[in-house]
Image (cartoon, coloured by chain):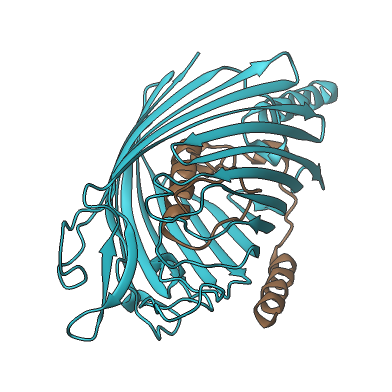
Chain colours: A cyan, B brown
Amino acid sequence: MKNSASANIIALSSTALALPGIALADAPPTQSTVSYKLSNYQEDDLPRSELPFGKLERYDIDVQQFQLVAPMGRNMSVHVDANYESLSGASPWFTTLGLDGKPVVNLSGASGISDNRSELSAGTRYYLDNGSFAGNIGYSEENDYRAVYFGLNGERHYNNDLTTLAGGFSYSSDDIFPTDAALFNRVREEDKQSSSVFVSLTQIINQVSSFQTALSFTEQSGFLSDPYKLRDVRPEDKTQIAWSNSYRRFFVAANAAMHVNYRFYHDDFGISSHTGDFSWHQNLGRQFEIVPQLRYYSQSAADFFSNVDNFLNPLSEYQSSDYRLSAFGAVSGGFSLIADMGSWKATLTAERYLANDKYSAYDVSQPSTALVKYNRLSLGVDFSF
Amino acid sequence: MKQLRTALLLLTCSLILISCADVRAWERGYLARDEMTWDPDPLESALNDHIFFSKEASSGGNSAAGGGCGCN
């Protein structure tokens, strides 16, 4: 009888460990999954107060994503990812003072910009009794940009699989060759390199909650300026640090899971940021799920940011009027509807993103023009076989 | 450096605050549910990372960076 009880416990434990994600113990997927997601996001027109002349339209972007994840033998899995992105519209070129003394922006090209990005990456993961290790390579190409990258990472479980320590490294070599370089006196060909390392610790807290904390360092060197801006000169080295924390909790009575994430970021351009997001994964019966989500982001300005380009500044000095280097805050919210039909799963997501200097948690000494607002709509399908 | 020290201090505190209840393997059913995974929809999170990377100055976090793009 005792042996039978022990056997049952062992069987139960084995079953539990074989479930995906359980106990943080890794196991290769038991079946293959093909995923496809089609998304569109469209930036709002600029207000006329920020752009006195010309068309107000900004970017309209379509993204298609494909992924295949499949088991390979008993201890391995492989994945292939392919992305195709097409964009058209206009982007800020330079800023000046308007007639009312406030900054105004000038967009690039009366006819706008049109570009495509294709990306292909592949990777594999090898599973051990108490962890796994993985590698991936990738290639991305645009009309004016090319990136080749690879990454290695691994994880090991401790403390009866209650604790997981993970770490990884990645490297990217990028080439930049702007279009119409001779016409607009842009750089002809430049390059940059990025190296990144991370370490993370994951801990099961109790039967319904777990926590993860992670630290990443990224070092970039080379041409880090924006070649499409009229006056954009940035340092040729940047060190970034990001500290992320994630918490998951399942509420049994509500049959729902809560996700809370927070990230602190700092780089030596002088930018710091806080990012917090919250989502509630509410099950509706066995087949449906609704996921409302909310995100808040705020960053400080780069040391060399100016909301009006100073044409008297020598180009040997660091300078940029790129709104992405200004102090601002952003609020975004949306929801996903998920229908899980066994081997088929469909996900519909809608999101609204609003950036504004008034939302900033940091001091805003120079409010930027051209902060982005956009709507996003995505439809994803997964098929397992 | 002050912000880095604060981040490291908070990290240490958060690690101390984690209680390590002994949750047996067969008690982890809720943790194993799809909606409790760290990344329930990898394509969705990859898309979000890419969009935010193109609109904001911050990036990075719980993984190493991938390839760059001309969007930032």
In this picture, is A157 found above or below A323?
above
In this picture, is A287 found above or below B57?
above
Q: In which quarter of the view is residue A62 placed?
A: top left
Q: Is the N terminus of chain A in the top left, top right, bottom left or bottom right quadrant?
A: top right
Q: Nearer the viewer, residue A235 or B36?
A: A235
Q: How far across and how far down the image is residue A100, in percent? A: 18, 85
Q: In which quarter of the view is residue A285 placed?
A: top left
At x 47% / y 66%, what residue is drawn? Answer: A232
* Extreme-right residue of the structure: A3
At x 66% / y 57%, what residue is drawn? Answer: A220
Q: How far across and how far down the image is residue A55, in percent? A: 16, 56
Q: How far across and how far down the image is residue A381, in percent? A: 38, 26
Q: How far across and how far down the image is residue A60, in percent? A: 27, 45
At x 79% / y 42%, what residue is drawn? Answer: A157
- Residue A355 visible in this rendered orientation of the protein: yes
Q: In which quarter of the view is residue A92 placed?
A: bottom left
* Extreme-front residue of the structure: A182
In this picture, is A349 found above or below A302?
above
- Residue A252 visible in this rendered orientation of the protein: no
- How many numbered circles are shown? 0
Query: Is residue A43 toward the left or the right of residue B65 in the image?
Result: left
In this picture, is B57 found above or below A28?
below
At x 21% / y 79%, what residue is drawn? Answer: A98
Query: Is residue A44 toward the left or the right of residue B24 in the image?
Result: left
Query: Is residue A293 toward the left or the right of residue A55 in the image?
Result: right
Q: Nearer the viewer, residue A100 or A196?
A: A100
